Image (cartoon, rainbow, N blue to C red):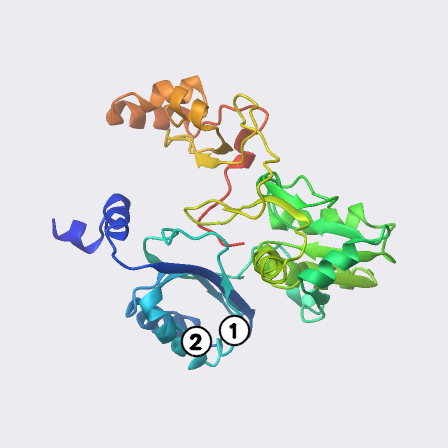
Amino acid sequence: METKDKYPSKEKLKKKLEEENFKRITLSFYRYVKILSLEYYKISLERRLAEISIFGRIYIASEGINAQISVPELNFEKFKNILNEDDYLKNIPLKIAVEDSGKSFYKLKLKIRPKIVSDGLDDNAFDVTNVGKHLNADEFNKAMESPDTIVVDVRNHYESEVGHFENAIIPDVDTFREELPLIVDLLKDKKDKKVLLYCTGGIRCEKASAYLKHNGFLDVNQLLGGIISYAHEVKEKNLESKFIGKNFVFDDRLGERITNEIISKCHICGKLCDRHVNCKNDACHLLFIECKECEKEYQGCCSTECKEINSLPLESQKVLRKTKGSMNELPEHKSRLRPKLNQII
């Protein structure tokens, strides 16, 4: 009983979150900066954020910090003071969520990682600070108007499936690690063209733009603040949104709407839908797109087999997991639709 109180279940934490009588603000931030004494810094930052009830995930590495969190609105000024009193985080740009229920995270988790973004690159092999030119929403839109401009989505396929910029190159990849060498290869004959890169909040573009410049691309540009900042600026300045659909996010929301267009389909029935869910069968837990009708028919699962398994007693399910392992029952998507949602990329 004591252990349960010390380490409450996910269900209890979510219930406690639902019972909060104040609003939360979901936001993200990152910074490439040389951090010393990682363990000490992690403990110190965790204590300061926990004191004001911050929830979310923060990755710390010797190369910097990458965070996606929710902040109680009543503690927002205290939160900004914590950032500005921190030499590593002072004046760091914050990307406020476009759509926000305040229910994006239910606990605080800080982790020390080799890198703040898993990119598979040897950072000593090129100048990671030699990044592309940052363009705001208006500049990005205008740059897209040229027929010689190449727009590249540096996110994973399940992100771009529900939303992307018009006429963008969308590499069919599962991870950022796979994407970088593929982009260089796809554009190897276009190194003199203007290249526009974009991602969710800008962090992947920082590394991607430096990598492209290292590989001989002459005019590399990146969307300042990513899709999140773009959506805010489009609204504030009444600009045309050249991003259509939904922006996939790595928290319990799984997405925030940018425009009303629905550009993807339910993976089961093919009906227009951009609603990501995880299969209710814990042995599968596939991330896939499912309309509400199919969710009802398959009881939140991705297939008839998973539905049948999920209806079994828990002990029987555990036996099946040991004998069959993890299952993905949509052969056209296989395991690729199972991103690690505990990673912020």
Image coordinates for residue 105, horizontal then vertical, percent: 37, 53
Name which residue type carries label 1. Ile
Q: Secondary structure at mark 2?
A: helix
Q: Which residue is mark 2?
A: 83
Residue 56: tell me if it is visible. Answer: no
Q: Is residue 290 left or right of residue 53?
A: right
Q: Are marks 1 and 2 in contact (CB under 8 Å)?
A: yes
Q: Nearer the viewer, residue 76 or 84?
A: 76
User: What's the distance in space between the residues labelled 1 and 2, CA to CA?
Assistant: 8 Å
Query: In this rendering, is residue 111 above or below 79?
Result: above
Q: Given the current orientation, which residue lies at the most extreme front position?
A: 238
Image coordinates for residue 174, horizontal then vertical, percent: 60, 41
Query: In this rendering, is residue 224 above or below 9?
Result: below
Q: Which residue is mark 1?
A: 92
Image coordinates for residue 5, horizontal then vertical, percent: 16, 53
- Quadrant hosting residue 316: top left
Q: Given the current orientation, which residue lies at the most extreme left position?
A: 1
Residue at 25 percent of width and 55 percent of height: 20
- Quadrant hosting residue 137: bottom right
Residue at 58 percent of width and 54 percent of height: 200
Name which residue type carries label 2. Leu
